[in-house]
Amino acid sequence: MSSLAGAVWPDLTGRPLLLVPLGAVEQHGHHLPLGTDTTVACAVAEAAVDVLDSRVPDGRVPDGVLLAPALAYGASGEHEDFPGTVSIGTDALTGLLVEYGRSACRWADRLVLVNGHGGNLDALRTAGACLRAEGREVAWFPCGVAGADAHAGRTETSLALHVEPTLVRSDRAVAGETTPIAGLLPRLRAEGVRAVSPTGVLGDPTGASAEEGAELLAGMAQRLADAVLAWDVDPAGRLRG
């Protein structure tokens, strides 16, 4: 795997594909670290780079793949009632992503933002549409799992147990609000997460396991790699797949 942070500029020949993990610093209940979204985005991107590197000889990624340092702060205003959360908001994140894309695309052929936090979606849609309207090959990909609970439940806990097991406080894990996210969104937007779930959990971590996390991570990485190779991007910049 090639790392942008570890590279020196004379070795950056051609126009590589750049994968950029995008996360957040926000509460994840009593048992998961504040950096969980960033950690998961990094793990998915890193695993996808390994898959893509194995496909370089087929000519579809001719100048190679680079993994960029993570963008670790996002739009997490709904979590700001919990200590530790640091949100830069949608407007600031949008501006950051636009300027990042403009700069990186001076030398990178394509740029993919690998998103680990749902609160970043408005910024990604706006920035993605802007950058693509300017003629830049920029897309974003959500680290999503079909049927997953919303926040700090079984899905994220399983991923964390696989990626960073020493930081998971399993003895503190408790179930939170388990109503499907669609039914919670109006109140979440109006009042924030704490008003809906005092523990900060939207889901139930019961039954989470590192084995399940490994399977989930491998699936997301493979979907990301396949989507990059297909390069089917919607008008808001989302990489379909």
Image (cartoon, grey):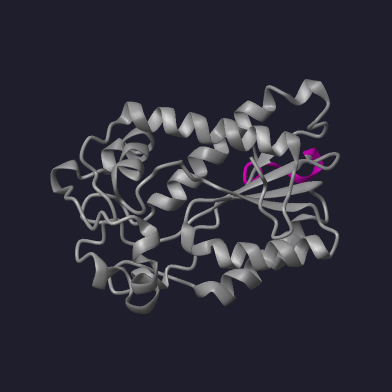
Residue 225 spot, x, y in % from top left = 64, 33
- Name the quarter where the C terminus is drawn: top right
Q: Tell which of 225 and 54 is nearer to you.
A: 225
Residue 107 image position (x, y, % from top left): 82, 51
The total of numbered circles placed on residues is 0
- Do we see residue 108 in this rendering? yes
- Judged by its main secondary structure, the magenta piece is loop
Q: Residue at x 35, y 67 (%)?
A: 85
Q: From this viewpoint, which residue is outermost toward the left?
A: 171
Residue 79 counted in the magenta span: no
Q: Which residues are magenta?
A: 4-11
Q: Looking at the picture, tell me which residue is in the foreground, 19 or 241.
A: 241
Residue at position x 45%, y 41% in the image: 146
Rendered residue at 34%/68% (across/down): 79
**Residue 215 location, x and y as percent?**
42, 27
Judging depth in this view, the residue of 204 and 47 nearest the camera is 204
Position above or below: 143 against 207: below
